[in-house]
Image: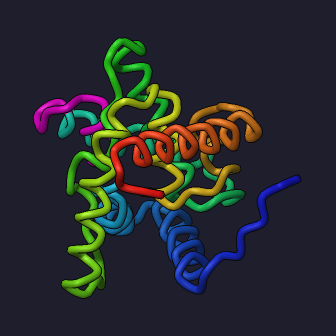
């Protein structure tokens, strides 16, 4: 059964905005590319920190991702959100850069992505939740951590995660299901859940 996800007005607006920016860039508008970079720089940095664990390598990675995105922009067909296309490109570049040797660090470990429009109470609750699952997430296998991050912290659908990681969609679903089960068992064992 395919995952059905209704896209919010924000997703639809982002899709239109990004599609128009891509068209402008392909027509030679460099300011449009600068705008696109500013929209997704934090997302790419967060992914880079997960792989490289230091700001210097992450900064180089971000530059490499956007350079590659610029050179391959004509290949973006608009069949997915631009953010999904860019995240897949970044993920593949990161995996290739570290030659699958480095361990992925969950985005839950860092506060790289901003908490937009959260009240102070919501921000604190989010922080407490992140702290509560932090240790359990660190113990997950890398394949589970990557899928969990892309699903929960980047708000990607199963299909988008499949596109980004090149894993079959059913494998993504299975990884997320197993990761949730493992996290639940660990949190129950620590007395954090019933």
Q: Is residue 168 left or right of residue 95?
A: right
Tell me where residue 13 appears, x and y as whole percent: 55, 82
- Residue 56 part of the magenta segment: yes
Where residue 138 appears, as percent x and y from the top left, is: 33, 34
Q: Is residue 99 above or below residue 154?
A: above
Q: Quadrant of residue 106?
A: top left
Q: Is residue 110 left or right of residue 98?
A: left
Q: Can you name the residue that lies furthest to the right here? A: 1
User: Viewed as shown, does residue 191 lie left or right of 3?
Assistant: left
On screen, residue 46 above or below 52: below
What residue range appears in magenta? Answer: 45-57
Residue 136 coordinates in the image, percent (x, y): 36, 40
Foreground: 108 or 89?
Answer: 108
In percent of width and height, residue 44 lies at: 34, 48
Q: Nearer the viewer, residue 180 or 86?
A: 180
Q: Is residue 42 magenta?
A: no
Chief secondary structure of the magenta portion: helix
Residue at the location (42% across, 40% down)?
A: 186
* Camera sees residue 38: yes
């Amino acid at each position: 059964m395919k995952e059905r996800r209704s896209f919010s007005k924000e997703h639809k607006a982002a899709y239109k905005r990004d599609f128009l920016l891509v068209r402008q860039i392909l027509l030679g508008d460099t300011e449009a590319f600068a705008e696109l970079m500013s929209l997704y720089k934090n997302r790419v940095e967060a992914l880079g920190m997960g792989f490289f664990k230091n700001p210097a390598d992450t900064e180089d990675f971000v530059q490499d991702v956007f350079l590659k995105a610029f050179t391959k922009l004509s290949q973006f067909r608009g069949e997915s959100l631009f953010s999904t296309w860019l995240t897949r490109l970044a993920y593949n570049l990161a995996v290739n850069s570290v030659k699958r040797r480095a361990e992925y660090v969950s985005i839950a470990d860092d506060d790289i992505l901003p908490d937009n429009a959260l009240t102070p109470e919501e921000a604190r609750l989010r922080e407490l939740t992140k702290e509560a699952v932090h240790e359990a997430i660190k113990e997950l296998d890398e394949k589970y951590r990557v899928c969990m991050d892309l699903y929960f912290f980047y708000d990607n659908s199963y299909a988008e995660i499949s596109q980004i990681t090149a894993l079959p969609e059913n494998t993504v679903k299975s990884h997320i299901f197993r990761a949730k089960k493992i996290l639940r068992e660990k949190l129950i064992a620590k007395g954090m859940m019933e």
